[in-house]
Image (tube, grey):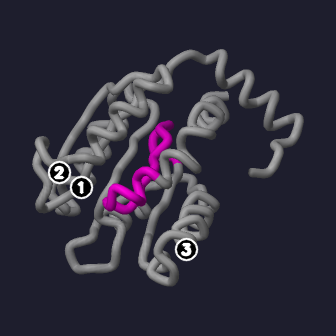
Amino acid sequence: MPKPSASTQAHRQHAAEGGPLAFAVVTVSDSRTPETDTNGDYLRAEIERLGHRLAAYHLVKDEARQIAQLLDELAASEAQVLLFNGGTGISRRDTTYDVLSQALEKTLPGFGEIFRMLSWEQVGAAAMLSRATAGVYSGKLVISTPGSPAAVRLAWEKLIAPEVAHLAWELGR
């Protein structure tokens, strides 16, 4: 992993002083239930392990209207970071990316680009099917990943966990 610049290190230090973040976890799936949502379980545990807290958890069907309504509800909540997983592929039922990309006020193209680069190492050319994305909506950090457990872990471990406090700090300054 590349060594961060002095300014990035200083920003991360300031961010760490900001205290715990409030997260919302949203699993978008037509087949999972609260009992079978391994992504939700994993993300909740990881959020708490880092000293942050879960402000909301939702499991919704891959229906554009439901996703859009939930996005607005979460934007009005105390959650600072909204983590969506699922619905980022290209099938007819995959609508998460479409809803979020239309709503985002600022995008973080690097998130999707780096995610696909890292995913390439795991799944090869199939990485191009992912429409992982991130950005800002109503002052909230929104991150959307594919719904496979391997993709959720990859995004969390390599991209989200290392930078989420820094991203939230940048958003709030």
Relative horizontal placement of residue 128, taking residue 58 as reference (left or right) = right
Please give the residue where the numbered disc 2 appears in the rendered image.
60
Please give the residue where the numbered disc 3 appears in the rendered image.
120
Pointer 1 local density, CA inside 10 Å: few below 14, some 14–19, many at least 20: many
Quadrant where the C terminus sits is top right
Give the residue at x 45% y 23%.
Answer: 52
Cα separation, mark 3 vs mark 1, equals 23 Å
Question: Where is residue 111, by image quadrant?
Answer: bottom right
The residue lying toward the viewer, choosing from 169 and 46, is 46
Give the residue at x 15% y 48%.
Answer: 36
Give the residue at x 65% y 21%.
Answer: 16
**For marks 2 and 1 on the same chain, the one whose residue lies earlier in the sequence:** 1
Q: For the residues labelled 2 and 3, say whether their Cβ atoms are less than 8 Å apart.
A: no
Please give the residue where the numbered disc 1 appears in the rendered image.
28
Which range of residues does the magenta coloring cover? 136-153
The residue lying toward the viewer, choosing from 60 and 139, is 60
The residue lying toward the viewer, choosing from 107 and 125, is 125
x and y, in percent, of residue 161 in the image: 54, 39
Three-letter amino acid code of the residue under disc 3? Trp
Q: Nearer the viewer, mark 3 or mark 1?
A: 3
Pointer 3 local density, CA inside 10 Å: few below 14, some 14–19, many at least 20: some
**For marks 3 and 1 on the same chain, the one whose residue lies earlier in the sequence:** 1
x and y, in percent, of residue 81 in the image: 45, 36
Three-letter amino acid code of the residue under disc 1? Val
